[in-house]
Structures are given as structure tokens and as C-alpha cells.
Image (cartoon, rainbow, N blue to C red):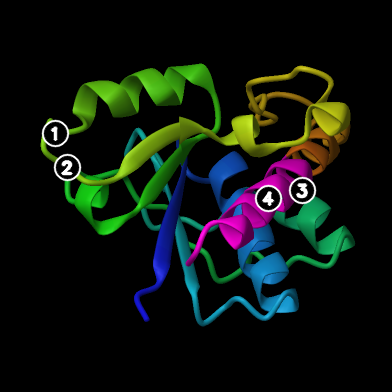
Amino acid sequence: MKKYRVLFVCTGNICRSPTAEGIFQHQSTKLGLQDHLFCDSAGTTAYHVGEGPDSRTQDAAKQRGYDLSKLRARKLTIADFDQFDLLLAMDHSHLDAMQRLKPDNSKGKIALFLDFAPASQIQNIKDVPDPYYGGPAGFDHVLDLVEAGVSGLLTSLQQDPL
């Protein structure tokens, strides 16, 4: 059986999208879906290629039981639009950049990540905010939103045949 492939995308691939990648991996393994799902993350820019997630991102994630230490930033490529079934933008600016980059004949579907989150958990928030220039509370808020989005995404993927 082919694995369903998901790519999470933010700006530099050091805060939001690696958080989503790590939580998705963790939660899909807890559900026993690791043989059916593959995920990765990327940035719309090459600012941090090869770097691990921001230390504050890693610290906040670790407090909730997620290990992001092995992840490394990379830039979104045109090939990603055919290599992934679903490419999820962490905010509207990423969605716009992805829509401009996506080749017309590519098979990957693009969507906004929080469209998968139950509205009751995110209170009509559509963008995962960038915590990079803020304090620790911003990283916790990102974790709250990403946990809700991943939960909704996994529920959606389980309802559709994998």
C-alpha cells in the first residue's frame, strides 16, 4: 500500500512546520498509522537550510513530549508538489507562495493547515502565528494550534481510505 505523504510549510522551516512534522509523526505513531503516513516539512525561503528547529521551539515541544532534535530545515521545491499528496501552509502568506510556485499539472493538493482543526479548539484562527520574535507564550500557543490541526488532519485522513 502506498503511503499518504504530507508536507508542512512555513517560512524558514525552524518553528511552525517542524512542530507540525514532529507532532504529526508522534501522533500517527501513537495511532499505529506510521506505515501508512509519511510527513516532512519545508520553508518557503532558504534562510535556515540545514539547521535544526529553533531552540525555543524544541524546548516547548519537549515539555509536551515531542522530540524535534533530528529535524533539519529545507526549502520547498517544485518536485514537492508531485512527491506529496497534501501540502499544508501554516499561514496565508505561505499558501499564496505555494500557489504561485505550484506547477499546473502537479498532483499535490495545497491547503491551509488550520482548515483541518476543529473550530471549537482554535476559535476561528486561520493562521498559525510566527512565534520567532515573541516570548515563550507564543511557542506554547503554536503548540496548541498545531496539536488541534494535527488531530483534525489525522481524523480526516482516517475517514478517507489511506
Viewer-nearest residue: 36 or 145: 36
User: Horizontal placement of 128 versus 103: left or right?
Assistant: right
Q: CA distance from mark 4 to mark 2?
A: 24 Å
SS state under label 4:
helix
Instruction: Write down the residue under mark 4.
Output: 150
Can you say whether 126 is above or below 61 in the image?
Answer: above
Residue at figure coordinates x 32%, y 23% from the top left: 97
Viewer-nearest residue: 136 or 99: 99
Q: Which mark is residue 103?
A: 1
Instruction: Write down the residue under mark 2.
Output: 106
Q: CA distance from mark 1 to mark 4?
A: 26 Å
Amino acid bearing label 4: Val
Amino acid bearing label 3: Glu
Q: Earlier in the sequence, mark 3 or mark 1?
A: 1
Q: Would you say the residues marked 3 and 1 are in contact, meaning their CB atoms lie under 8 Å apart?
A: no
Residue at figure coordinates x 38%, y 35% from the top left: 110
SS state under label 3:
helix
Instruction: Write down the residue under mark 3.
Output: 147
User: Horizontal placement of 130 versus 52: left or right?
Assistant: right
SS state under label 2:
loop
Q: CA distance from mark 3 to mark 2?
A: 29 Å
Q: Earlier in the sequence, mark 4 or mark 2?
A: 2
Residue at figure coordinates x 70%, y 30% from the top left: 131
SS state under label 1:
loop
Q: Which residues are magenta?
A: 146-162
Circle 3: is it few (<14), some (14-19), or many (20+) Cα within 10 Å? some
